[in-house]
Each structure stands twice: as structure tokens, then as C-alpha cells.
Amino acid sequence: MSLNLTQKIIKDHLVAGEMTPGSEIALRIDQTLTQDATGTMAYLQFEAIGLPRVRTELSVSYVDHNTLQMGFRNPDDHAYLRTVAAKYGIIFSPPGTGICHQLHLENFAKPGKTLVGSDSHTPTAGGVGAMAMGAGGLSVALAMAGEAYVIAMPKVVKVNLTGRLTGWATAKDVILKLLGLLTVKGGVGKVIEYAGEGVATLSVPERAVITNMGAELGATTSIFPSDAATKAFLTAMGRPGDFTELAADPDATYDEVVEIDLATLVPMAAAPHMPDRAVTIAELAGMKVDQSCIGSCTNSSFADLMAVADILSGKRIDPATDLLIAPGSKQVLKMLSARGRIDALLDAGARLLECACGPCIGMGGSPVSGGVSARTFNRNFEGRSGTQDAKVYLVSPQTAAMAALNGAFTDPAGWGEAPAKAELPADAPSIRSLFLYPPADGADVDIQRGPNIAPLPPFTPLPATIEAQVALKVGDDITTDHILPAGAQITALRSNIPAISEYIFSRVDAEFVPRIKKLGKGVILGGENYGQGSSREHAALGPRYLGVAAVVAKSLARIHRANLVNFGILPLLLADPADYDRIPAGASIRLETGAIAPGGTTSMTVDGLGAIAVKNDLTAQELEIIRAGGLLNRVRSARA
Ligand code: MIC
Ligand code: SF4
């Protein structure tokens, strides 16, 4: 039977399950990655599982999110991560080396391998043909323990690329266009597989821009075939041996097909405050831009920054516009420096930041009050920049550089000749000596645990009856940034659940935490696509710690749904979405949990309304996990 690329990799790694869309499958995981903001929890959970060493082919721990080190918290986290990595056989990437996804692409990602990472942009590695998925920290901990990763067998969408990019159109504009077509919920339960003659015209770093931001579609992952461009990239990275050719069978079938003619694309932006609000830059012409930020795991490659340097060379940015640039890795920085291109950036007035996530996760670089920021990042959720009333437009590096020069968005028709695409040098300098490799035996390594590393709180099994109030009612497309905001102050508390729980929903309803603390327990009522965005499991752990027993929504985002299951919160769906309007905040709910069957419909009693039908898409195993009070309880009792 002929298979598409996604099916081939799944078949190769299938441990259990049927490959029919929607049914549960378990996959063998070859590689894992973590970053600091989710990594401390992942490793605390790995420790709780009690194995002496990771069981993957390769596991890497990156420090890139919170590198500000204001006070003891970040350095405590970093020291914990460094020592825990040495003990359990994990490669450690010290702060400042680069952004996890950029570094993984350059140094470790391999065609045909499975990768699970505790960050939603893990699909970046799909740029070299890896099947790379974002997950909560606990799921990554289990993958490190050698457990199979359980997902719903995805549908596969073929994005058929034809033609080639022209003028100022870039890979970023491909994904912005697709987001406009499919929306932030359009990829849920699906893998986005790229095919067609247009694929060969895109380099691996360009492909990685597209797979990276596929996360914003809500997709399980995105993937490109592995071909001559992949070989050239891996060779430039000093890893020709990691290449294998991979493609869909010629007569492979797909669940859906989307056509994109690259030749028709123009510079685009995602307007505030959602990545799918696609507009053309021409439509924005005349809008003042107060800040441009270039970098993040989406757009911080050598080719991206070479294009920026070309645009800025010999010019000065607008005096009223702030331009911040964070290269994706020290390798990128070294290559720019070797070509004398750093001068072009500095002399134009740009501010060069550390090779880290930086402003993308609100670690500094916040825009001015009410300001417009043109960012090459992947998320423009309200307030994520650190300035609540800022308006963030997601754009390509070329567009961000032009906006900084002009102090405004202008019509690309007047930009003149676009800079040529920089080819990766065949002799790209390796920075792999900067990683810390674990000793063959970590038994003697002492883990450094500063006061910021708090033990995991224990969770009790699911009660037979949930009697609680709707402690919060929220609308559609609630992101994990709404549930648990990012930024330096809050992210510094990621290793301390009691402390970070104080910030749950703080930007949505400042009264939520005092209210649920008083109630002792509660239920959240959500709209469509509840929990989209980041993989941060703290957005489930925090609510669980505060007493949230169930989330009842119209629909749920994949990673957050899995995190709810992992921590024993019931993810329920309204059988009739119209009931959402009928249930008020504060309503008292009673639900007999014993009556819940996998994939079944049951009813909850809502005061004043009577019985309201709720369904679930849980498997028998997921329901058992929830009944046990979470996955860690379940794994511990299975291993006892
Ligand atoms: C993000 O881009 O939102 C983050 C910060 O990288 C998150 C992970 C986190 O919250 O630590 C993600 O994308 O998963
Ligand atoms: Fe870091 Fe931003 Fe990428 Fe998240 S999206 S991994 S915060 S650069």
C-alpha cells in the first residue's frame, strides 16, 4: 500500500494502535528536547519515575527562555538542569548558546526520526523530515523513560507547493498565508505535509520557518520531505552521515489537499492579536512602527539575518524606531561575524541581543505603550510582549528590517530589489564543543537543587462526585498565555508550582485565584480551541493545584488537552455548544464521575438548568489516568 511521508514514519515507530485517523496510537520516540521554562518540571518528573538513565537515542536540555538571571531563581534552574542532565545522560546546552529549535535543527535533528519536545515549536525539526511533536513536560519525561508517546492518529493534509517565491516574498509569507486560510484551529488532529515541485525551491532553514509556525495551526506537526536540499543543509552542518532520503510514495493519498502557488505570494503580516489574522503589508502601508524585533525560533537563521544585514547595510534606522536582533544560535552569530555583517547591523542602529528567545516570550524588549511592534516571531497574543496595549504584527525579517528603516510599514512595491538569498557556507563553523556531554556513568553526579526548585505537589485521585462552581467562564481561542502568562517575573517561578499558581488567569480575571482558593475547587467553562498555543504544562498543573477538577469547553487544543489528562483534570466537551451561552459563571455543577465512559456522553446537573449533556473523547487509558489523579500517580503505581 502506498503511504505518505507521515504514515511512513508513524509505521516505522508504531508500538501499538491502528493507523486510522482519530484512533489512539503509541509511537517509539528516538529523541527528546526540553527548554529551561518547561525543562525543570520535566526533569523533576523524570526523577520521580526513578530510572538511572534516559532510554532515548538522544536527549538534549536547552537553556534559552529565561536567561535574565535577575536574582537567584534562573541561575538555580540552570544549575539544576546542568547537573540533572549530567546525571541522567542528557546533553546540556548552556544559556546563550542559542534557541532550542534552531540549535536542534543545526546539530541533532535527523530525517525519519521521532522527536518529542517540551515546547510547542518542536515541529521546527520537520524542516529536515523529522516527525517532531510538542508535548507537556511529563510526556517528555515519559519518552525519556522509554515509554511510547500516545497521540491520536492524525489526518494528513497535503500542502501542494507549486512555483517559486519571487521578490520580497519569503517562507514566513507562506505560513502566514496558510494560517489565513486554515486558521489557528485548522490543523487540530492533523499533520501538515508539504509536497509538490515548489518544495525543491526552499532551503531547510526556509522549510523550518514553515514547520515552526505550523504550531499556530494547532497541528500535531508539520513535515517536509528529505531531499537534495536536506543533504546540502546537513552537509553544511558537518553531519552528512545523518542524511537519508525520504518522501511520500508517488501515489500516496491524503485526507485533504491545499494548493499554494509560491509565485503568487507577497509580503504578509498577522495582525493583532492572533497569528491567523493575515493581511498584506501593502494594506498596512502608512502605519507607524515603533519597534522591530528580529529573531525567535521562527526567523533567526543565517539566511534571515544576512538578508537583514543586506537591507540595513550603509543605512540608519528611523530614529523613533527601536530595532532588536537576537540571532538563533552562536553558529549564526559566528557566521555573520566571519562575513563582517555584524557591523552592518550595529552601524544601522540595531541592538544586538543574546542568542535566546528574548522578547518573543516577554523577556525584555517590550514595546512602548500602545505601540506597534513588527516582529519576526510566531505569536502575537495580547500582552505576550509585556505591554498589554501594544499591537504586534508578525512579519518576515525582510519586512521587519524595512519597517525599522522607514519607521512605518510601507508598500513593498516601492522597496526596490529584494536581497539575494544567502546560501549556507559549506564550512559552517560547528559550535558543538559548547554543549556539555554527560559522563558515561552519572551515578556520582550530585544534583544541585537551589531554593527555587520546589518538590512536585502530590495529587489525589478523581473524586466520585464533582460538586463545584463554574469558577471562570472564558470565550473562544483562550491561549495558555491567558491561563499562565509568560514574562520574566512569572517564568522565573516555573520550578515552583505553589508560587506560580498565584498567577493563573491573572491577566484575564485578577479575582480568579482568590475566588478559587475560597471555593477550594472549581470548574472552568471554555469556548472553542481552549488552551491553544504553548505546551507549558503549568497551565494545567497550576489550575489542578488550585482545585480545578474539570474543564468543560466547546473544543480543546491538542497539547493542552493532553496536559489536562496528565494532571488529572477532566477535559469535557459540551454535547450541544449552544449550552455554553446558557451556563453562567458561578453556576453550581454536580457531576457523577463514575458515569463517565471513554468516548461517551453523560450529563452534569447545573443549578437552575437541570441536566446538560457533556461528552468526552477520552480513551480508556486516559480516563484511568484521570481517575488515578494524573499520569505520575499511574506510572508510579504501575512500577511499584
Ligand atoms: C512559547 O513560545 O509560548 C514557549 C514559551 O516557547 C512555550 C513553552 C513555555 O511556555 O515554556 C511553547 O511554545 O511551548
Ligand atoms: Fe522561544 Fe519564542 Fe520560540 Fe517559544 S516561540 S521557543 S519563546 S523563540
Image (tube, grey):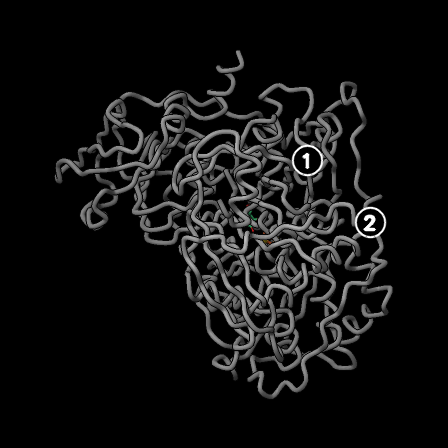
Mark 1 secondary-structure assignment:
strand
Give the percent coordinates (x, y) of residue 351: 73, 66
Residue at (51%, 72%) from the top-left corner?
A: 261
Amino acid found under the numbered disc labelled 1: Ser
Please, is residue 372 above or below residue 437 in the view? below
Give the percent coordinates (x, y) of residue 565: 42, 32
For residue 543, which quarter of the picture?
A: top left
Residue beneath label 1, please? Answer: 59
Residue at (44%, 38%) from the top-left corner?
A: 19
Neighbourhood count class around disc 2 (C-alpha, 10 Å): few under 14, some 14–19, many 20 upward: some
Please, is residue 163 above or below residue 615 in the view? below
The dot on residue 431 is 2
CB atoms of marks 1 and 2 within 8 Å: no
Q: Is residue 588 left or right of residue 640?
A: left
* 458, 1: nearer the viewer: 1
Q: Earlier in the sequence, mark 1 or mark 2?
A: 1
Give the percent coordinates (x, y) of residue 191: 48, 50
The dot on residue 374 is none
Is residue 90 visible in the rendered image? The answer is: yes
Amino acid found under the numbered disc labelled 2: Ile
Mark 2 secondary-structure assignment:
loop
Q: Is residue 403 left or right of residue 583?
A: right
Q: Is residue 33 left or right of residue 270?
A: right
* 478, 108: nearer the viewer: 108
Please, is residue 122 above or below residue 453 in the view? below
Give the percent coordinates (x, y) of residue 8: 55, 44
* 622, 582: nearer the viewer: 622
